[in-house]
Amino acid sequence: MNRFLVFLLILFGAAGFTALNIFFTVQESEQAIILQFGEPKEVIYDAGLHKKLPFIQNVAYYEKRVIGYDHPDEEVIAKDKKRLVLDTYMRYRITDPLEFRRTVRDEGNVRRRLSSTVSSALRNVVGGLNMEDLLSSQRASAMASIQERVASEVRAFGIDIIDVRIRRADLPAANSQAIFERMKSERLREAKEFRAQGEEAAQRIRSKAERERTVILAEARRDAEKLRGIGDGTAIRLYVQAFNKDTEFFSFYRSMQAYERALQGDSTTMVLSPDSQFFKHFAIKQPSRGQRK
């Protein structure tokens, strides 16, 4: 009885071990190649449960999803002789696992191939552009050209390039400070030129304003003198008309004004002869000789 149980256990164990070597699972994100003594026999693209010959066949799995690759920073000389450090990344997908295994075998090898291919494409494309072009709308066309070059060269590896992007284009650290100082001096020179142009324009405006001010003031004085002359003439004419109407009253009125101006204050002292015309309106009579005695 014990021997029979041991036999059943051995039988079930062998069946389970054989089943594990016959059936295998491919995930949704995977594709597989059935190998027999290292030679490809079948490519499996569909997910699910599959079978193979036990013990003499094995399975190699490959990624079906999009794979990202960060290219190491690359120093490239642009067309205008400026050195740039480019940070580039790319995305690709394994479309032919059989060709992929035959040419590069695994992802480690394909990354080394991609590194050299991307470096060559960057030098060829960026080497024909100025630094300003990579900072303008031409950057998109440059990346499209790099992607096309890389895709054409790695298509034989059974992979398809989805995208190639230049994330950042920087100046080398050794050159950044020198370029910054040169740009700073250029901006300062331009600022001085603009400031000088502004001062010149301001001086022209001030000169023009001063000239206009002088003209306006001269014209205003001229008009004021004209108006003053007209007013004085009108006043004189009115005075003459008034004087002609009553000469005695006009003489009396002018004398009163003269008295008012001359006799202002409490300590005013005037020395005049008795027969002075200044006091004629006071009617001071001179004493006769008999009265004097």
Image (spheres, helix red, strand yellow):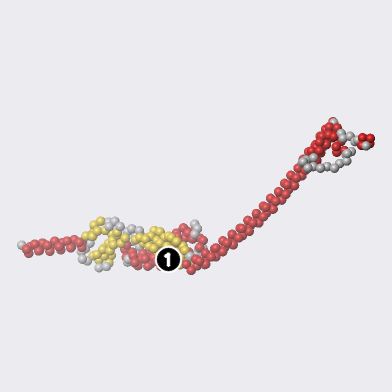
View extreme (top): residue: 245
* Pointer 1 residue: 73
Pick the residue in front: 67 or 205. 205
208 sits to left or right of 289: left
Which image quadrant is residue 87 in?
A: bottom left
Give residue 134's position: percent from left, percent from top. 49, 60
View extreme (front): residue: 293
222 sits to left or right of 130: right
Tell me what residue is drawn at x 32 percent, y 59 percent. Answer: 64
Give residue 30's position: percent from left, percent from top. 29, 59
Give residue 126's position: percent from left, percent from top. 48, 64
Tell me what residue is drawn at x 12 percent, y 64 percent. Answer: 10
What crowding class fits label 1: few (fewer than 14 Cα within 10 Å), some (14-19), or many (20 or more)? some
Q: Is mark 1 on a helix, strand or loop?
A: strand
Pick the residue in front: 237 or 160. 237
246 sits to left or right of 99: right
Give residue 43's position: percent from left, percent from top. 29, 61
